[in-house]
Image: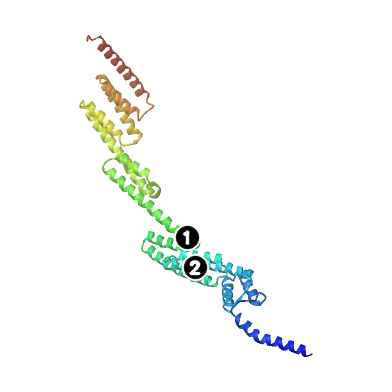
Amino acid sequence: MFRGQRKNRLTILIWLVLGPFALTGCAHLPTWVDGNSECRQIQNLSSTGEHKAAVDASAALAEKGQSCSEEVQNAVENSRSTLNRADSLVKQAFEEKRKGNLVGARENLTRALAVYPRYYWVKKLLSVVDRSIALRVEALMDEAQYLEAQKDIEGALASLHQALALLPNKPDLKAGVARLEREIQTGRLHQGAEESLEKARFYLDQKRFLDAQRTIEDGNALVVTPLEAGRLLDEIHRLRQDWAEEALAAAGKAEKTGDLGGAFYYVGVALSQGPLDEDMLNDIIEFSRLLGMKLYSKGKLSQAQEVWTLALGYDQNNSKLQGYLEEVDDRLKSLKKIQEEGDVRQPR
């Protein structure tokens, strides 16, 4: 009995001596609390995508000198990595916003949400940027409306393009851009048509009828301004006939005075300015046929050949001209052969 009492006293004494020392000496070491609700809550936050909350809860637990298991700590590290990647994109968004690049800011915030979908602050920042974009688009649309009223269609289109870059899926912006682009294209077509008509009138004043006609036909004036272009073509045709008639009259006058070379020149002038009415063309071809015969009768075979060749180019089925050319060609070949034989017989 006495011994048992002594043993109990010794146990009490050891506890009294070592107990406080153990408690104060180990106070700085972390205590494992895996089983408590805080660690379970941290792991749950991380697994459900509440990464910032998980990181903050873990930091708060560490400040109390407590720690969770390695599994929970790994989950916290994954959350911290996700949070850092999202924050990096948010910083880039701020930088783009400072530059005035709202689209770039929105893109970076959207990417941040893709990394961390439940990041509350990013959602809030994205909402602010979206409001800024909406206000900017509204201002650009008002600007475009004003510029269009001032007939500055290209300026209005530029404003709408800026707005469309901010909100590429906005239907009324797409429709407005398409409408202004059509209007600008139509304006350019009309401007090109007017320039073609002006150039054609310039050629017409210089009696360059063929150039005037080609300028109208090769441009878009007949499509864009058909009435005006048609009237100008009619005028070109009328003046061309008058020109050909005057040239044919000059050719006849020269032929009567014996200036057969001058007559041939005026025939070329009459035919040089493009298509003629059938009656006028027939008169010129007949005059050319008779002129060639007169040259032929005077022994001017080469000149006759030139006149008939020119006329045949405008009346390719004219059998008389074809026969004349065959005959004059034979005559020229015979003369050339006689000349060559004569050259051979001459003594050296």
Of 336 and 112, which appears nearest the observer?
112
CA gap, disc 2 and disc 1 = 33 Å
Instruction: Report the quarter where the C terminus lies.
Output: top left
Q: Residue at 30% of width from left, 40% of height from top?
A: 209
| Residue designated by label 1 | 175
The reply to whether discs 2 and 1 touch (Cβ–Cβ < 8 Å) is no
Left or right: 253 as drawn, with respect to 123 = left
Q: Position of residue 20 (x, y in %)?
A: 63, 85
Residue 332 at x, y percent in the picture: 30, 18
Q: Nearer the viewer, residue 169 or 103?
A: 103
Q: Looking at the image, is 59 positioned above or below residue 102?
A: below
Say whether residue 50 is left or right of residue 91.
right
Q: Amino acid at mark 2?
A: Val
N-terminal-most mark, 2 or 1: 2
Q: Which residue is mark 2?
A: 90
Decide which of 88, 259 is in the foreground and name it.
88
In depth, the one of 59 and 131 nearer the eye is 59
Q: Could you tell me residue 142's position as x and y percent? A: 41, 67
For the point 47% across and 60% down, the residue is 175
Q: Quadrant of residue 303?
A: top left
Which image quadrant is residue 259 in? top left
Q: 332 above or below 195? A: above
Q: Is residue 54 above or below residue 252?
A: below
